[in-house]
Image (spheres, coloured by chain):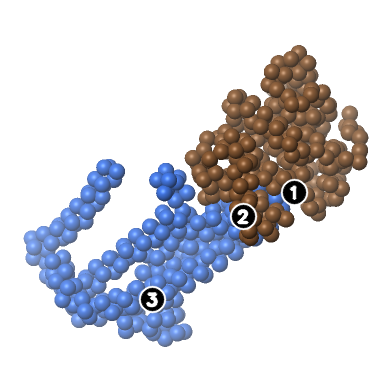
Amino acid sequence: MTGDISPRTDDTFVELENVTLAYGRGDKKVVALGETNLRIDQGDFVALVGPSGCGKSTILKLVTGLISATSGYVYVAGREVGAEPVRVGMAFQNPTMLPWLTVRDNVMMPLKIVPPFRQEYQSKKKTEFRDRADALLKEVGLAGFGDKHPWQLSGGMLQRASLCRALIHEPQLLMLDEPFGALDQFTREELWAVMQELWLKLKPTVLLVTHDLKEAGYLANRICVMRSRPGQIIDDAAVPFARPRTIDMSYTPEFVSMTQRLRELIVSARPVRETV
Amino acid sequence: MDQQLRRRLWSVLLIIGFFAMWEAFCWIFHISDIVLPKPSQIIVTLVQRFPALWPHAVQTLYTTLVGFAFGILAGVLLGVMIGSSRLAYDVAYPLLIGFASIPKVAVVPIFVLWFGSGAVPAILTAMIMSLFPIVVNVATGLATTEPELEDVMKALRATKLDILWNVGLPRTMPYFFASLKVAVTLAFVGTVISETVASNRGIGNVMMIASSNFDVPLVFAGLIILAIMGVALYAVFSLVESRITGWAHRKDEFAMG
């Protein structure tokens, strides 16, 4: 299963070709990611699941260009990562809001950095951007919180704002690194719905890293299962459920048997604990 | 608020108590004016000689502020350079600490040798005294920026300058302003040291001449002026700090205001 597990199509937006990543040298060398091939179509929603330390976040960072591969190639929009003029949005498990800015200014930050908005930011468009941020905040249920500072908001609210920041510049590529991981169950489910709605509307290509199989099943079109040491994709399956999906759907036998299958895969892929 | 008021009241009482004890101590043990003048006597001297002391106080304040301004400028530039990368920080830190630990009094004669006596060595001493806390704090603030905050920016393909301007520098502001409080007091010390050694103006010079004339009450009057100016400068920069970097203290009053 480790070869070409996803066939190349003309719509391929993200492509990892024989990518490996290792830290350190010699005896201390740790292979974080074994040879990995992965293709993601434009507008697709792919979830990466697997045991902790399996290199899920590593793939995400490789695709974003935050780290470079030890060997192999990472292509985004047909060009090597870093060279491509692709707009990337990112949300982490921590909301990572800048504490000195208001929530609205935090959300507007990408517009200040990313072309072509960057050039327009200083000029007349600022009020327009402001309205755009407010509209997006409203969509995630944060209407009227734009002028607050991050410490005045709860964790769930901050995570909503963080999603807004990841989406405001209409990214072609959206990277989600366990963005709902630190939230309570109800807030999480609510944000899944918000996320699905935003994805259906804006159709960015999404790569979601998560521990939560229900979350992967609810949100993703495709679920890639990884194993650790070295990190590797061992399974890649489509999620057959129609959109828009609901929480109720996650209690259907089909959904449950899917998550069960994934769970077994992950458990069996867990590194064997050495017995004393 | 009540608690705070009470604490302030105790602080004031402690200060008054300190001077009262001093006064009483001098009375009881019949301490000579030449050794330790009474606070009452210092105040009388202060009032009587105020017209003569005033220009010197202004000179000292002026020298301090000019030196401090240069110190901020050089300190921020050096701090940004050193703090901009982990490597630069690790490489430069030992040298920085080396320079910082030199007693600055020792460099005054060198400045006098280079620039003669007067305002220039005093300004330079004030600058060099205030420089290091600023450099160290700015560099530390920048070097310890959370990697996640930078990742958000890097994912947006932000340039180094973008990151510095939008994340590094704002995040460093609390460190910077905390260092200003310390640095302005040090600049003040630098000025007075230099005035004492090589100048014909300033409170430091007045105290030097007064002590060689055994005009001890005047020496103490100078000391009181220095203390008042020092506290005032500290207070000004504390206020500026709490105004600008209120977000770091996460007070609700700030958020509402």
User: For this view, does A194 lie left or right of residue B122?
Assistant: right
Q: Nearer the viewer, residue A165 or A94?
A: A165
The colour applied to the residues of chain B in this rendering is blue
Image mark for residue B156: none
Q: Quadrant of residue A258?
A: top right
Q: What is chain A's hue in the picture?
A: brown
Q: Are marks 2 and 3 on the same chain?
A: no
Which amino acid type is marked by label 2?
A: Lys
Left or right: residue B130 compared with residue A61: left
Q: Which mark is residue A126?
A: 2
Q: What chain is tagged by disc 3?
A: B
Amino acid tagged 3: Thr
The Cα–Cα distance between marks 2 and 1, rounded to whole angstroms, is 20 Å
Circle 3 is placed at which residue position? B63
> Could you say where residue B173 lies in the image, as x and y percent from the top left?
50, 56
Extreme residue in the bottom direction = B116
Residue position for label 1: A87
Q: Left or right of B54: which side holds A153?
A: right
The chain that hosts pointer 1 is: A
**Where is the N terminus of chain A found, in terms of image quarters?**
top right
